[in-house]
Amino acid sequence: MKFGVVIFPGSNCDEDLIHCLQESTHQQVVKLWHKDHDLQACDMIFLPGGFSYGDYLRSGAIARFSPIMQNVISFAQTGGFVMGICNGFQILCEAGLLPGALIRNTNMKFACANVTLKTVTTNSLVTSTLSTEKALKIPIAHGEGRYFADEATLKSLNENDQILFKYCDESGNITEKSNPNGSLQNIAGITNSTRNVFGMMPHPERAASKEVYNTDGVGLFESIMSAAKITA
């Protein structure tokens, strides 16, 4: 596979993500500048975390109109794989590629901490080999990470098995106390109805190295490679 990482003004997790992809998948990874239109024949596009355009207006609201997003949207609409992490998740929601929205944390403060996630489904490219029994320790860093959607959207997400991750405690229990930002139903990550676009607020690329004493995020990237081989 060939991965592309879009670089927006204000991206600050792009290099982490590129390094993680290279080390975890041993595949080619290229940078895609936000003003370009060429996706360079990538098989999967990533929108990294950061503060695109300074998070003016709303997080992701301006980046959604970057020139390259026209191509990312077309790519996704024709079945191409796209994943957004943190700010990338916000951008995908703003672009209408994922349902719902990410709004201010309930405590109105920036949250930066290790949290634990429960994998809700293995029926996706990014969770295909993950265990639904093991809680993953993955860091968050956001001020607008509260997942919000209307009742009809939440109902659809549940019925169609589109919820990828939920915030939980270390034992895998999904509780109000384990929710770091007030996300409805503790939702931390979702996929679209056609299961080719993925978004999550926590940063798996920051939990993918022995140097930081946490490799819980590696499994997501290994899942991508495993599922890609099956569908190839």
Image (tube, rainbow, N blue to C red):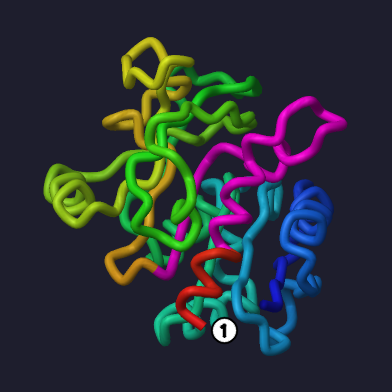
Residue at 76% in and 74% down: 32
Q: Is residue 43 visible?
A: yes
* Quadrant location, the N terminus: bottom right
Q: Position of residue 131 (x, y in %)?
A: 44, 39
Vertically, is 13 above or below 167?
Answer: below
Q: Is residue 219 magenta?
A: yes
Horizontal side of 102 relative to 89 (left or right) equals: left
Q: At numbered mark 1, what does the secondary structure look like: helix, strand or loop?
A: helix
Q: Is residue 137 magenta?
A: no
Q: Answer few, some or many: residues within 10 Å of disc 1's Cα (few below 14, many 20 plus, some between 14 and 19).
A: some
Vertically, is 230 above or below 167?
Answer: below
Q: Amino acid at mark 1?
A: Asn
Horizontal side of 78 relative to 32 (left or right) equals: left
Residue at 39% in and 30% down: 133
Q: Residue 72 is drawn in which quadrant?
A: bottom right
Q: Which residues are magenta?
A: 196-224
Q: Residue 205 is drawn in which quadrant?
A: top right
Horizontal side of 34 relative to 163 (left or right) equals: right
Residue at 33% in and 47% down: 121
Question: Residue pushed farthest top?
Answer: 177
